[in-house]
Amino acid sequence: MNLLWPSMACLPSYRAALEQGWSPNTVRPEAAQEDLARLDADPEAFVASLVDREAKGAPIKLPDGTLAKRLPGYVRWMWDGAFCGFISYRWQPDTCELPPHVLGHIGYSVVPWKQGKGYATRALALLLAEIQDMPYVELTTNLDNVPSQKVILANGGYLVERFQKPAAYGDSEGLRYRIDLPRPQAV
């Protein structure tokens, strides 16, 4: 399994995952239908929207339906000859802090028919190796999401806190993990 940049060549496999009932948003399953509509309207624009390092895209729809300002970020697709899932990275320039509506720097999801193969663990390791100029990243999980917790721990993560999620995310308790990143070496 490798990480690929979203592309028109791989888009049919992404579409097939959506059509099989997978959603890129574990909190908002309707995001699958929204992505299919965006694909139908303008496939090139859809693919381009997945890499937005300057946060020029439209606001983000939160689980409660409210809109929030987009952060810089990008998506990478997990690929083993077909679409396996995605991993995303988002940040605020010049700080590790995130606004309250952004629960973590990194999110990921593996399609159900490819789960249990270590793809999320490998994807997170590959993504962490790409991140520059950040001393750490934070990821969050639900209390009952043991597989995701194992992925984070396998990549050097450690539990920072139990926290109360904002109302937009169900006002439930979650776990916040941190992964320290190596500092770039001076030359």
Image (cartoon, rainbow, N blue to C red):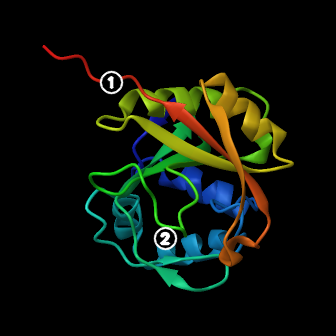
Instruction: Residue 156: give x, y in percent of width and height.
Output: 60, 24
**Closer to the camera in the image, 74 or 3:** 74
Instruction: Residue 106: give x, y in percent of width and height.
Output: 53, 47
**Closer to the camera in the image, 166 or 77:** 166
Under circle 1, the secondary element is loop
Amino acid carrying mark 2 in the image = Leu
Instruction: Residue 20: give x, y in percent of width and height.
Output: 75, 59
**Is 58 on the left-hand or right-hand side of 176?**
left
**Which numbered mark, 1 or 2, is in the foreground of this view?**
1
Residue at 54% in and 32% down:
179
Instruction: Residue 9: give x, y in percent of width and height.
Output: 42, 48
Return the mark for residue 183: 1
Q: Distance between the residues labelled 1 and 2?
A: 39 Å
* Residue 116 in sight from this viewpoint: yes
Residue to which mark 2 is pinned: 39
The N terminus is located in which quarter?
A: top right
Amino acid carrying mark 1 in the image = Arg
**Closer to the camera in the image, 143 or 72:** 143
Mark 2 burial class by Cα count in 10 Å: few <14, some 14-19, many 20+: some
Residue at 34% in and 72% down:
57
**Is 151 on the left-hand or right-hand side of 48?**
right
Under circle 2, the secondary element is helix
Residue at 79% in and 31% down:
116
The vertical placement of 111 against 152, above or below, is below
Based on the displayed image, in which of its 4 quarters is residue 135 positioned?
A: top left
Residue at 59% in and 26% down:
122
> Which residue is outermost to the right?
144
